[in-house]
Amino acid sequence: MSIKNKVVLVTGGSSGIGAATVELLAENGAIVIAAARRTDKLETVVSTLRQKGYTADYKQLDVTDFEQMQDTVQEITKAYGRIDVIVNNAGVMPLSKLEALKIDEWNRMIDVNIKGVLHGIGAALPLMKEQHNGHIINIASIGAYEVTPTAAVYCATKYAVRAITEGLRQEATHNIRSTLISPGVTESELADHITDKQASEAMIEYRRQALPASAIAQAILYAISQPAEIDVSELIVRPSLSS
Ligand code: NDP
């Protein structure tokens, strides 16, 4: 099944898994719009693809702002006639123990990881209903299945993303598919923003064996590539166990 000319919005498209997904989907013929806050990074991702003859564009977007998300999705629909897929990928992971009381970081994780995903769904769903098809892909984590020390709030946000995606699947109408992709440790900038010294140091060993971001992009491509009657509900992708 080809993804040629499918119109795909990838949030968090400026680095890591999002950037790898933008690249892989564009290389496979999709019309890809990368969205995030850092336009210099988005520009680099998109211009490299354009130079190779692929179709890609970018939008500045803060997923915590529902109006911005709505405007982005509406602009894409106006420009390309529809929106086939939204990949709600933007996320942050400033880990720390609960007792550190990093309230601002808790709130940021809730705002980006949960509300950001809900905003993507809220913006895309009405348009997908109108066009009688669509695909909503949410990026969770192995932290959506197990909790580890320093990751209580991060995991809580990813459990929430899993619950939201399952709810979406159960309520599906208008040929709208939903997919949860849960990466294990993957090379990206995700751990670079941890401010807690202990949590940051612990991550160095924990993240030593990591998947390339392209492995998660491949999982996303697989879900999108399926024929309309096949809904890939959930994929977990981890580094292989090694001794
Ligand atoms: P990165 O830090 O490389 O990418 C995160 C992306 O999210 C960036 O493009 C960033 O762009 C964007 N982002 C952050 N805040 C906002 C915001 N408010 N509005 C819009 N975009 C935002 O990490 P990953 O690629 O690893 O993360 C992608 C997803 O994968 C996340 O949801 C993460 O939780 C999940 N994940 C990652 C794992 C890993 O080991 N890497 C494992 C499991 C899950 P910008 O700063 O330009 O806005």
Image: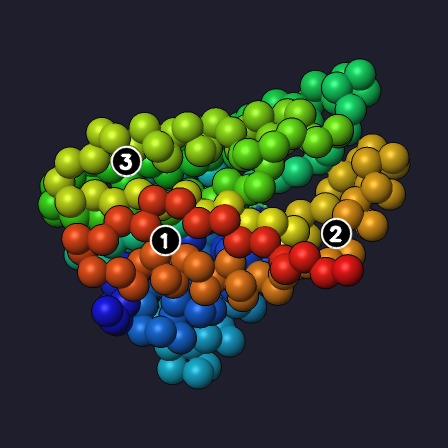
CA gap between label 2 and label 3 equals 32 Å
Q: Are marks 2 and 3 in contact (CB under 8 Å)?
A: no
Query: Which quadrant of the structure image shows residue 132?
Result: top left
Q: Kindly identify the residue that appears in the image at 39 percent across and 67 percent down.
A: 25
Amino acid type, label 3: Arg
Q: Quick one: which residue is furthest to the front in this view?
A: 243
Amino acid type, label 2: Arg
* Residue 58 x, y percent position in the rendering: 43, 59
In front: label 1 or label 3: 3
Residue 64 shows in this picture: no
Dot 3 crowding, Cα within 10 Å, few <14, some 14–19, many 20+: some
Placement of the N terminus among the 4 image quadrants: bottom left
Amino acid type, label 1: Leu
The residue singled out by tag 1 in the image is 9
Dot 1 crowding, Cα within 10 Å, few <14, some 14–19, many 20+: many
In front: label 2 or label 1: 2
In the rendered structure, find residue 207 and report the number of the disc placed on it.
Answer: 2
Residue 24 shows in this picture: yes
Q: In this view, does 114 lie to the left or right of 94?
A: left
| Mark 1 CB near ligand 1 (8 Å cut) | no
| Mark 2 CB near ligand 1 (8 Å cut) | yes
